[in-house]
Amino acid sequence: MKAVMWMFGAMISFSLMAVGGRELSGELSIFQTLFIRSVLGLICLTLVITFSKQKGLIGTQKLGLHVFRNIFHFAGQYGWFVGIGLLPMAEVFALEFTTPVWTLIIAALFLGEKITQRKVISICFGLLGVLIIVQPGYAIVDVASLIVLGAAVTFAISYSATKYLSASEKPISILFYMCVIQLPIGLVMSIEGWVTPVGIQWLWLSVVGLAALAAHYCTIKAMQHAEITTIVTLDFLRLPFIALLGVLLYAEAFELALLIGGALMLLGNLFNIKGFGSRKKGQQ
């Protein structure tokens, strides 16, 4: 039950971040949004670290890997926000669910992980889901969809780096360096087209910044209370939920193909995770 509550919090947080990004689209540059998001995140994390009075929370011996991770994570966030401004929000979330597929491929190509039959089937499920959502041949594949797919690939690279960092780094340390490293990148990229936020724009910027931190925190907490298969299944509920928000808030059309494609991705992820769990039991 605790995992369900934490994942519900993550679902709400991701959705709020998407709504905030949609409201700011066309008003402020994405680079500026990401810069202010990092500022707000850094303020919150600094307060947490200060009041916790725990030593070594942000110590690291892998600064280079943090930099590598956050360059790709920043690129992924940029592509994600581009998609939020141009595509139905449910399509962005659905395409984002291809990240585990790209992670499998990247791990095999660059990290030397073995590609098993189960992993191949999982990848096929994921790619089939993408084809159903993007529908090549039925309609012109728009550039925005390709940008979001590219963002999913960069998220996968970032996720692979996070797996290595999480073995020795505390979660709050990973989030702290995420803000510290991405803040100057966002600042430099946003200077040329800087527009000083006014009025309700500050509200939406705060929503984006705080929701991003809350989403990461809720997901981590959920993982402490449930198996990864449960987390992946609960995370999939983001898709129909954001589709409903898109219909209610922005009159977006409800596409059955999104749910079908997303469901195939979910099945592929669960199939691969189940195989991973079976191997672990066999090794015990």
Image (cartoon, rainbow, N blue to C red):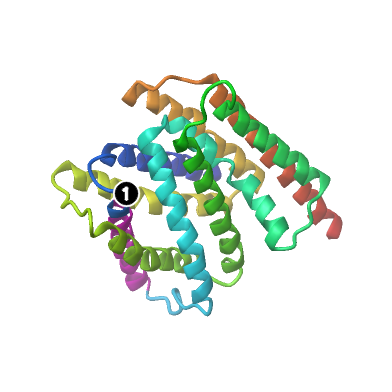
Q: For this view, does 235 lie left or right of residue 180?
A: right
Q: For this view, does 110 lie left or right of residue 65?
A: right
> Foreground: 46 or 191?
191
Percent of width and height locating residue 42: 33, 64
Q: Residue furthest right?
A: 282
Q: Residue at x 68, y 51 (%)?
A: 104
The image quarter in which residue 200 lies: top left
Q: For this view, does 28 lie left or right of residue 99?
A: left
Does the stretch in magenta take in 48? yes
Percent of width and height locating residue 213: 39, 54
Does the stretch in magenta take in 160? no
Q: Residue at x 48, y 45 (%)?
A: 6
Q: Residue at x 27, y 54 (%)?
A: 32
Dominant secondary structure (helix, strand or loop) of the stretch shown in magenta: helix
The image quarter in which residue 162 lies: bottom right
Magenta segment, which residues? Answer: 33-52
Percent of width and height locating residue 176: 40, 67
Percent of width and height locating residue 87: 41, 32
Vertically, is 160 above or below 251? Answer: below
State whether residue 227 appears in this view.
no
Considering the image in quadrants, where does the N terminus appear?
A: top right
Kindly identify which residue carries mark 1.
30
Q: For this view, does 114 lie left or right of residue 57?
A: right
Total marks placed: 1
The image quarter in which residue 12 lies: top left
